[in-house]
Amino acid sequence: MRAFSLLAALAVSATASLAATVQYDFSVEWVQANPDGAYDRSFIGVNGAWPPPPIECNIHDRVIINVTNNLGNEPTAIHFHGLFMNGTNSMDGPVWVTQCPVPSGSNIIYNFTVDQPGTYWYHSHFSGQYPDGFRAPFIVYDRDEPFADAYDVDTYLTVSDYYHNSIPWLSANKFLILTNPTGAEPIPDAGLFNDSQNIKFKVEPNKTYKIRIINMGALVSQYVWFEDHDFQIVEVDGIYVEPAEASMIYITVAQRYTILLTTKNSTDKNYPMVTSFDTDMMDTLPDDLVWNVTGWLTYDENGEFPEPALIDEYDFYDDFNLVPYEKEEPYEPDYSITVDVSMQNLGDGVNYAFFNDLTYVAPNVPTLYTVMSSGNDSTDATVYGSNTHTYVLGYQEVVEIVLNNFDPGKHPFHLHGHVFQVVERSDASPDDETFLTYNPDEPGTINEYPMRRDTVYVRPNGYFVLRFLSNNPGVWFFHCHIEWHLQQGLALTLVEAPAEIQAQQVIPDDHYAACKAGGYAYEGNAAGNTVNLFDLTGEKLQPKPLPAGFTARGIVALVFSCISAFVGMGFITWYGLSDLKTTEREVAAIVGEPLDDSDESK
């Protein structure tokens, strides 16, 4: 045992000696850009440029990002998506979860050690800023990765949807409004490859490329393929997997796939590479929307660049069948959380998203700061507020999350601070009237060694079962990564091992200074009360329910009455000729009220 300990100490010492400090200085600014060549607009960039720079480091490096907010009109913050932030929960970045917003003119330092290899990304976690441009890859290189000798070139490829209008404008004028009672998400204007279009991805013959693919979009999942080139999937969300042969992937918002692609032995042809929107995730398909984006594996820059061939179906690899390189059998849960997803209208007429009839509303005090200032009361979920939907977890327990989707849409869910085993995932239900829910007495397919990752999607009206080990004390967000659904409140909070957080972690002074500069509360319960932590007077709450007896037909009538008041009788004429019955049925389905079809004149 003594000899083993000595060898272990020497190994740790050798690793530490190889580690470096990687430092970035970010001035967060507005920058003009036109990535699809169709519309010039303002983006959130860094140091006068857009897109922001990738962050790159080696495993075990310390990364320091000195951020100055020079936007002038908005606060900001950065989340480092997929990084565990062991022992440094305050660096995770979601506003009102682990920090205050950083007001314009203020500075904050993110300082953490990266002890996990793989493909990640960083993005703003404040008020829809990342679809407005504040996002980029975060790559952690690993000298000892299992596939180090299997490729010649290491590179990345990002995909994303793209909006010509800003997210705050779309939210205020098109989305979270009374005239959108069904909660239809704004439709993207375009898709992007590496924040551009028509890219030429230069390759050489007879070489193997390690391509890290990241979906940095706001809404749609995408199908990605490389014409006439198969590949091997070798990593997802920072987890190495046994090589899996594939010809296409399905990548949701926030997911990452790393593939090994070997090129042809000739340069006589260039090959299309395509990313295609999952159009099932959009309520409408505008006539002018091009949902396929084409680039090219470019063997010959002077050659032709052909259009992609038509395909009969999307034949993608199901990530549920991936096998982690480091295998673990399914965990046995110590503590289980069951949440039901639904979309409903509240008393203000706006459509919200819910876990168990609660829609997330941010507290007045960041939840981590409540942990640090609540002493022994930190184990009582009450102090974290009525609408943060907080669960307090023990230390070193297996936690199970059962999610039943009572919504006909797909949702990619992300857990901060962890990867999880995907123990079960159902198919989609056969129709909108049928709901598949988890039954532990009749389990579905469970793989011998479940796939692990940090972002996974649930199918329409289906369910999944996740399990993870609560070995990382911190306050961790669990939420749908469709930006629109997060704005609707589809999130909950996990306060993991609060006593260990208090004993082991410190919030830096500059993080407190950002709170003070913005006039934000930084201690006490969710309402900011410091004397009686169980007095939640002044906390933010979700709107009240719809009035009793207020039906789907009532919402539609109210919506169109308001509209007609503004635009006059001409609109009433259009409304009378429109397909009102269809609109009413859509609203009825969401609100859960039956629609009386007996009166055919209606």
Image (tube, rainbow, N blue to C red):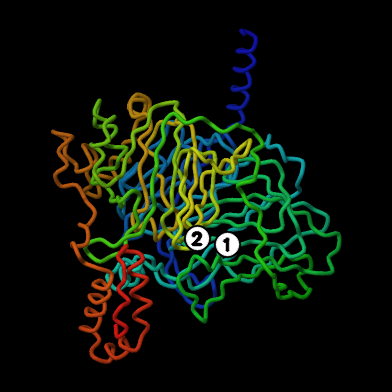
Q: Are marks 1 and 2 in contact (CB under 8 Å)?
A: yes
Classify residue 355 as left or right of residue 56: left
Tell me the tag on residue 217.
Answer: 2
Q: Mark 1 or 2 closer to N-term?
A: 2
Q: Residue at 65% across / 9% down in the picture?
A: 3
Quadrant where the N terminus is found in the figure: top right
User: In this picture, is 189 found above or below 490?
Assistant: below
Q: Residues within 10 Å of mark 1 (few under 14, many from 20)?
A: many
Is residue 169 at all visible to an observer of this figure? no
Q: Residues within 10 Å of mark 2 (few under 14, many from 20)?
A: many
Q: Secondary structure at mark 2?
A: loop
| Relative image position of residue 174 (x, y in whole percent) | 34, 72
Amino acid beneath label 1:
Gln
Q: Nearer the viewer, residue 206 or 46?
A: 206
Q: Please identify the residue farthest to the front as the structure is shown.
A: 598
Q: Residue at 35% across / 79% down in the picture?
A: 581
Amino acid beneath label 2:
Gly
Q: Which residue is mark 1?
A: 222
Tell me the tag on residue 417.
Answer: none
| Relative image position of residue 49 (x, y in whole percent) | 49, 62
User: In this picture, is 226 found above or below 84?
Assistant: below
Q: Secondary structure at mark 1?
A: strand
Quadrant where the C terminus is found in the figure: bottom left
| Relative image position of residue 227 (x, y in whole percent) | 73, 65
User: In this picture, is 526 found above or below 208?
Assistant: above
Q: Residue at 23% across / 72% down in the picture?
A: 554
